[in-house]
Image (spheres, rainbow, N blue to C red):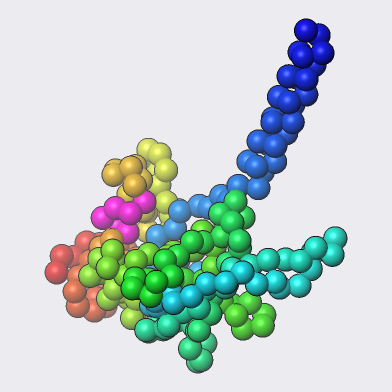
Amino acid sequence: MSCTMNNCLVALSILFLWRVEEMAEACSCSPAHPQQAFCNSDVVIRAKVVGMQEVESGNDVYGNPIKRIRFDVKQIKMFKGPTQDIDAIYTAPTSAVCGVTLDTNGKKEYLITGKLETDGTMHITLCDFIEQWEALSAMQKKSLTQRYETGCDCRIIRCTSIPCMINSPTECLWTDWVIEKTVNGEQAKHFACIKRSDDSCAWYRGSVPPRKDFLDIEDP
């Protein structure tokens, strides 16, 4: 009985250590407004994924091969990025290290934001803004061509609990989480934080380019 108990304690200890290691490796990201994702990304494209394969990209410090997933993509439009088209996107092999899973049948169109590596390849993680194109609002799609870019000098502050406030006139308070309990609420879907003529920033909603001096909220 004593031996059985010892075995149980050893098994539980191993399980605990495995869970601690798993949690330490888990991917953790801070939610970002689509405009923030656009401004902070090196590349923003609309594309279809047409293939996938596991590839090796060098070795780690112990000499073990570093594996990555390569998505072959068909670029439809580039909103931000290099002059050449993107035909491949790389990500980590598992979600535990922020790897992304995408549909590879070539039927779904995605909006994909990501970073450029030093070798010119595009890399994406779960922390990037990646969404099916048909799921985007009309405002989000229009903002990709110019509106988000005009607000890149502004700063969007995410409100996580009440009270919350801005500390600078160049900031916009993002309240989707406290009001709707989602980061994909009204402000994310229908508003952009844009600089005004006095260099302050404010939320803008509209189907036409904003006037030089507009109200904080403007309906179409």
Please tell me which residue lies in front, 70 or 84: 70
In the displayed image of the protein, which residue is found farthest to the top?
1
Q: Is residue 191 visible?
A: no
Q: Position of residue 111 (x, y in %)?
A: 38, 71
Which of the 4 image quarters holds residue 172? bottom left
215 displayed left or right of 73: left
Q: Assess whether residue 201 is covered by the magenta stretch.
A: no
- Name the residue at the left extreme: 220
Question: Would you identify the image quadrant in which residue 109 lies?
Answer: bottom left
Residue visible at 19% across and 78% down? Answer: 208
**Is residue 28 something one can see in this rendering?**
yes
Single out the residue that lies furthest toward the right.
62
In the image, is residue 69 above or below residue 12? Answer: below
What range of the chain is rendered magenta? 183-188
Q: Position of residue 147 (x, y in %)?
A: 32, 76
Question: Height in image: 95 above or below 113?
Answer: above
**Which residue of the protein is positioned furthest toward the bottom in this rendering?**
83
Foreground residue, 205 or 90?
Answer: 90
Q: Depth check: give the residue in front, 170 or 28.
A: 28
Q: In the rendered image, which quarter contains the N terminus?
A: top right
Q: Position of residue 213 (x, y in %)?
A: 25, 73
Taking the spot 63% from the left edge, 41% from the top edge, the residue there is 23
